Amino acid sequence: MSAKSTFAVLVAVLALAPVALGQGRIPIDRPMTIDKSGSYVVTRDIVGTGEFALNLVAEDIDIDLGGFVVRGDVLLTPGAIDRQRIALRNGR
């Protein structure tokens, strides 16, 4: 295999690595507002500063805490709790 081919394969593998490692989940590593539906994964302990640790304003949110700790308030959009499908799992 030529050096160009090897480089092209390496670039392709590295480009796909974050998707494979996170299994298509969006990483969370700090207090944040989640305003898009999707699958998320916490990548470190999160300590809320100010108003909240996580503010969930979208529907259909799946958060894998990955065994990490989230300290602070987890807020849900007022008045929308009944229609939101929120899952928090694998953490404290």
Image: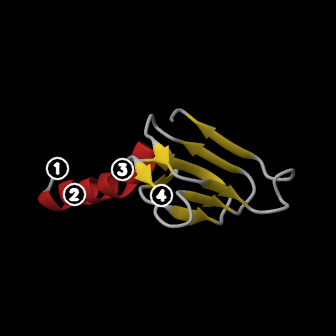
The extreme left residue here reads 3
Q: Tell me which residue sits at (58%, 54%) in the image.
A: 73
Residue type (three-letter) at the residue carrying disc 4: Gly
- In the displayed structure image, the side of residue 47 where residue 89 appears, left or right: right
Marks 4 and 2, the one that precedes in the sequence: 2
Secondary structure at badge 4 equals loop
Residue identifier under label 2: 5
Where residue 63 appears, as percent x and y from the top left, is: 58, 45
Residue identifier under label 4: 48
Badge 4 local density, few (<14 within 10 Å), some, or many (20+)? some
- In the displayed structure image, the side of residue 42 where residue 37 appears, left or right: right
The extreme front residue here reads 50
Residue identifier under label 1: 1
Residue type (three-letter) at the residue carrying disc 1: Met
Asked if the residues shown at circle 2 and circle 1 are in contact, with their CB atoms under 8 angstroms apart, the answer is yes
Q: Tell me which residue sits at (85%, 61%) in the image.
A: 79
Secondary structure at badge 1 equals loop
Of badges 4 and 1, the one in the foreground is: 4
CA separation in Å, label 3 and label 1 = 22 Å
